[in-house]
Image (tube, rainbow, N blue to C red):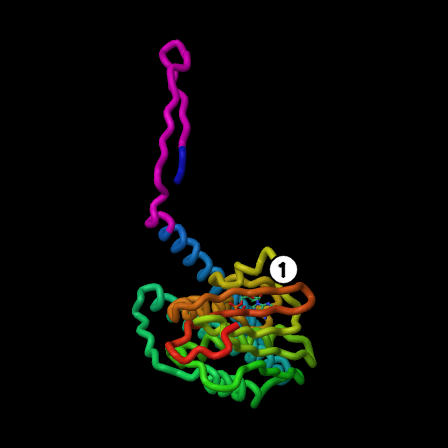
């Protein structure tokens, strides 16, 4: 709600009254504003890789192409930037499809435990930096109603962030536990952490806690925004806890399907 106050004067400049106009800032205005911000963000985000590519290509055209040492490096920068732009545009397309609700989920009854192990096994095949993955996953089966491809995207985004921001030799703890009628999944890393006032923002589109750093790591700033949309489309919630310099934990929930109650905590 927006309020405007005005004072009413008569011909002799005497105050004769006050008018207060209270108007509703409609949902539509909010959406329009968000859309404007979004377009402006997208433009900025795409301009950076484009200007980088432009200057490297200019240097190549101006003669660097003849230098056997420099030319491959410049070409590889251009290639990386192109790949990042493609990732970003793909992420954007996915978000816009989700916004338009043109994004049917193919949900099926899935045992989350064996599915989770499978996802972690995949990461274990090519994990860098001597990072250890530690599982705290109960035995037995816990069924959830999920679109496996989309849930894989959620986990991929969270786990690859945990790896990206982990120190050499760090341990990433991957947990799942039953809480009443839902599963609580958490991924904890020992990385640099996120400041308290930035914690909620990391789920916003294009938000990066440290722009320069995450750009270098090839991020798009859209991974967690997509994860949030997808978790919510599964009737779950997602949030983060972090201690600067100590590490970050991303939590999300998924409703459990009807099954025998076991050791609810
Ligand atoms: P990006 O593609 O930049 O990683 P995300 O949407 O996945 O985009 O994450 C948004 C921002 O949140 C990141 O740029 C980073 O600043 C912060 N972030 C996400 N996960 C972690 C983590 N595990 N540790 C520290 N910071 C993180």
Can you see residue 156?
Answer: no
Left or right, 9 with reference to 190: left
Q: Nearer the viewer, residue 68 or 50?
A: 50
Q: Nearer the viewer, residue 250 or 43?
A: 250
Q: Is residue 110 above or below residue 215?
A: below
The answer to which quarter of the image holds residue 162 is bottom right
**Label 1 CB less than 8 angstroms from ligand 1:** no
Q: Is residue 209 above or below residue 140?
A: above
Can you see residue 63?
Answer: yes
The answer to which quarter of the image holds residue 159 is bottom right
Where is residue 169? Give x, y as percent: 69, 81
Residue 26 is inside the magenta segment: yes
Where is residue 172? Give x, y as percent: 62, 78
Left or right, 247 with reference to 236: right
Residue 247 is inside the magenta segment: no
Range shown magenta: 4-30
* Residue under the image location 60 percent in, 71 percent down: 216
* Residue under the image location 52 percent in, 76 percent down: 177
* Residue under the image location 68 percent in, 68 percent down: 246
Q: Nearer the viewer, residue 226 or 174?
A: 174
Q: Which residue is mark 1?
A: 195
Where is residue 11? Give x, y as percent: 36, 11
Quarter of image, ligand 1: bottom right
Quarter the N terminus occupies: top left
Direction top: furthest residue = 12
Q: Secondary structure at mark 1?
A: loop
Q: Nearer the viewer, residue 99 or 70?
A: 99
* Residue under the image location 41 percent in, 72 percent down: 255
């Amino acid at each position: 709600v927006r309020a405007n106050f005005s004072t009413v004067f008569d011909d002799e400049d005497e105050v004769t009254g006050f008018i207060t106009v209270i108007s509703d800032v409609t949902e539509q205005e909010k959406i329009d504003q968000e859309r404007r911000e979004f377009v402006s963000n997208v433009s900025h985000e795409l301009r950076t890789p484009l200007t980088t590519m432009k200057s490297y290509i200019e240097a190549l055209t101006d003669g660097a192409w003849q230098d056997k040492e420099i030319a491959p490096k410049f070409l590889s920068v251009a290639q990386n930037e192109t790949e990042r732009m493609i990732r970003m545009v793909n992420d954007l397309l996915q978000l816009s499809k989700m916004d338009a609700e043109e994004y049917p989920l193919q949900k099926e009854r899935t045992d989350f435990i064996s599915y989770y192990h499978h996802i972690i096994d995949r990461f274990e095949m090519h994990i860098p930096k001597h990072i250890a993955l530690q599982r705290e996953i109960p035995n037995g089966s816990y069924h959830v109603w999920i679109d496996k491809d989309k849930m894989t995207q959620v986990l991929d985004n969270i786990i690859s962030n945990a790896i990206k921001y982990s120190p050499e030799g760090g341990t990433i703890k991957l947990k799942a536990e039953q809480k009443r009628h839902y599963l609580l999944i958490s991924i904890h890393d020992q990385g640099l952490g996120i400041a308290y006032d930035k914690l909620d923002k990391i789920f916003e589109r294009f938000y990066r806690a440290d722009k320069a750093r995450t750009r270098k790591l090839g991020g798009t700033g859209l991974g967690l925004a997509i994860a949030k949309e997808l978790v919510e489309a599964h009737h779950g919630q997602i949030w983060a806890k972090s201690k600067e310099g100590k590490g970050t934990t991303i939590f999300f929930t998924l409703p459990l399907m009807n099954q025998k109650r076991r050791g609810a905590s």
